[in-house]
Image: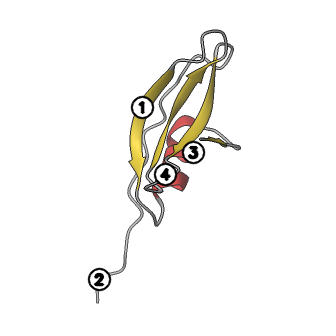
C-alpha cells in the first residue's frame, strides 16, 4: 500500500584538505564509529555510530565520500 520513500540526505561539508573520513573499529567489542581523522595531528572527531544496515552508506552520502578507511 505505502511504498518506502528514501529520506532526503542533507550534504554536509568538511575540511577535505586536513581531514579524512574513517571508521574507528573497536577490537574487543566490534563497535564502529564513523568520523574524521585530522591528517596532521591524528585526532579523531566522532560523527555517528555505525550499527549496521545503511549507516555507513548514509555517512558516505551525507559527506560526499567515496572511500572510508578503517582504523583500529
Q: What is the spatial separation of the Cα atoms under label 3 and label 4, in whole angstroms? A: 5 Å
Q: 33 above or below 3?
A: above
The residue under label 2 is 2
Point out the frontmost of discs 2 and 4.
4
Point out the frontmost of discs 3 and 1.
1
- Tag of residue 46: 1
Q: State which quadrant residue 52 falls in.
A: bottom left
The residue under label 4 is 58
What residue is drawn where x is 70% and y is 44%?
66
Q: What is the spatial separation of the Cα atoms under label 4 and label 1, in whole angstroms? A: 15 Å
- Tag of residue 60: 3
- Counting other residues with Cα less than 10 Å from the Cα at mark 2, is it few (<14), some (14-19), or many (20 or more)? few
- The answer to whether the residue labelled 2 contacts the one labelled 1, judged by CB atoms less than 8 Å apart, is no
Q: Which mark sits nearer the N-terminus, 2 or 3? A: 2
Q: Nearer the viewer, residue 71 or 64?
A: 71
Residue 44: x percent and y percent? 50, 24
Tell me the element at label 1: strand
Q: Nearer the viewer, residue 64 or 48?
A: 48
- The answer to whether the residue labelled 4 contacts the one labelled 1, judged by CB atoms less than 8 Å apart, is no
Q: What is the spatial separation of the Cα atoms under label 3 and label 1, in whole angstroms? A: 14 Å
Pick the quarter of the image with the N terminus: bottom left
What residue is drawn where x is 70% and y is 43%?
67
Tell me the element at label 4: helix
Point out the frontmost of discs 2 and 3.
3
Q: Nearer the viewer, residue 10 or 31?
A: 31
- The answer to whether the residue labelled 3 contacts the one labelled 4, judged by CB atoms less than 8 Å apart, is yes
Amino acid at each position: 500500500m505505502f511504498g518506502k520513500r528514501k529520506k532526503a540526505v542533507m550534504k554536509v561539508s568538511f575540511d577535505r584538505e586536513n581531514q579524512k573520513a574513517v571508521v574507528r573499529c573497536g577490537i574487543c567489542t566490534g563497535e564502529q564509529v564513523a568520523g574524521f581523522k585530522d591528517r596532521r595531528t591524528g585526532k579523531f572527531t566522532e560523527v555517528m555510530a555505525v550499527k549496521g544496515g545503511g549507516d555507513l552508506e548514509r555517512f558516505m552520502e551525507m559527506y560526499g565520500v567515496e572511500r572510508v578507511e578503517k582504523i583500529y
